[in-house]
Amino acid sequence: MSNQAKKFKIQAKDISFDLRHRQTIKFNISKYDIAVANGSERYQNLSVGKDKIAYLKRKMLANWDNYLLDFEKNAKANGIEVLWAKDTQEAQSYIQQILQENEAKLLVKSKSMTTEEIELNQTAEAVGCESVVTDLGEFIVQLAGEKPYHIVTPAMHKSKKDIAELFNEKLNTPLESTPEEMTIYVRDILREKYTKADVGLTGANFLIADIGGVALTENEGNGLMSTSFPKIHIAIAGIEKIIPSMKDLGLFWPLLASHGTGQQITNYNTIFTGPKKESEVDGPQNMYVILLDNGRTNLYADKDCNEALACIRCGACLNACPVYKTIGGYVYDSTYSGPIGSVITPFFRGFKEFGHLSFASTLCGACADVCPVKIPLPSLLLQNRKKVVEKNIRPLSEKLMMKGFRLVSSRRIAYDIVPGSIKNFAFAPFNFILWGPKRKMPTFAGKSFSKQYIQHKNEKN
């Protein structure tokens, strides 16, 4: 068993029975469920919309290289410098070079899971540049010294009381501060950061091939603020974020909003098509787009699982997953958690260390039901499990147990030969060694089903 798998097992055991944590997650996801249910009612036929967006993402994947090259050509024509990063190290190198060339001392960034993937904050600080996250949820977790807990809702694991106590400790705000008062306080801090920042960094919800543009959607206006004042704008995006055409946004944006937050459309939707023109007053003088691979082409090469690249990062599968709602986001120990994270992380970071994530699922199918782009997540998780077994990564004890089960289950006589009392005695240690003290092994009947059936049949005759 890998170190990551051992760590997962220990942390999952601890957090699963943290009732306060579970109550917080249950409350926050319940608010999401209500919002999404209301948002879905706006569609006359939501299934048709999902069919269309699923088709467009598969169309993209079928012509991925051409769309990426189209984006590069059109973005360059707009005055954007396009950089291709094969991995985290190359992306970090690009960013550090840009910061150093521009003698940047302060960077502000909007919410982006891709920047978490490449550890942007540490990357900037390594060359003497302060990195400040401007999304309120990410500001909270950064203040706490943590990473985002959820793809869409970074501070989902914290209650109002938790945040008030954190702000009181770190920022000396009143302990009884309301959410509105804390938001205003953070807004005042960030306004000053925006105006002094040398570089603004964003992610990208979509890369629009036919216009060479970067589409960004957010609720707080911090994405716009992060790109309006600084003289440099860096956008970093996974290469799977490409979509064919500008006209497709009319479908992508509403479906992302309805599945991500339950809104009809997110508050702020911006398309960046390059640095400011001569006739424009505001905006960056230079714009860079870093296209990140970082294992995505490994996933694309896998015909069994490459549909996962159709994901639009709405987070719906996390909120539907009973495992995620029990263990939360940090136990996965990866940038992307929940069902989608369990599929893609082994391809991004290696099956040896992260293959165990594909077993962190009940395969109930709830994730596939809610996915707006119709990714068959349970099937992909099963494919990953198969790969883990074929790579001989699973523990030897599990292999021996499965061989033993196969030996016993292949013949009915093997079930009947040992009475229930002996089976109960033999399996009693499972309550403490494998299943844990919070669960109890079901007891075996005194007689097997086949013996009970024969006895019942004889009694009737």
Image (cartoon, helix red, strand yellow):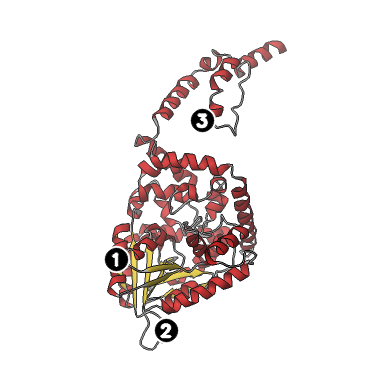
Which amino acid type is shown beneath numbered disc 3?
A: Leu
Front residue of 78 and 396: 396
- On the question of residue 360 being in view, the answer is no
Q: Secondary structure at mark 2?
A: loop
Q: Residues within 10 Å of mark 2 (few under 14, many from 20)?
A: some
Q: Quadrant of the N terminus?
A: top left
Residue designated by label 1: 94
Residue 257 rendering spot, x and y as whole percentages: 55, 64
Q: Is residue 451 visible?
A: yes
Marked residue nearer the N-terminal end (2 or 1): 1
The numbered disc on residue 434 is 3
Most distant residue in the right direction: 460
The residue lying at 39 percent from left, 34 percent from top is 394
Give the side of residue 15 with respect to residue 340, left or right. Answer: right
Inspect the image, locate mark 2, and give the three-letter code of the amino acid beneath it. Answer: Asp
Kindly identify the residue that appears in the image at 64 percent across and 54 percent down. 27
Say which label, 2 or 3, has the lower sequence index: 2
Residue denoted by label 2: 282
Measuring from the top left, give residue 58's x and y in whole percent.
42, 57
Q: Quadrant of residue 3?
A: top left
Question: Number of labelled discs?
Answer: 3
Q: Residue at x 62, y 70 (%)?
A: 180
Q: Nearer the viewer, residue 157 or 74?
A: 157
Which corner quadrant holds the C terminus?
top right
Mark 3: secondary structure:
loop
| CA–CA distance in space, label 2 to label 3 | 61 Å
10 Å crowding of disc 3: few (<14), some (14-19), many (20+): few
Name the residue type under label 1: Tyr
Residue drawn at x 63%, y 19% as measured from the top left:
445
- C-alpha separation, residue under disc 2 versus residue under disc 1: 25 Å
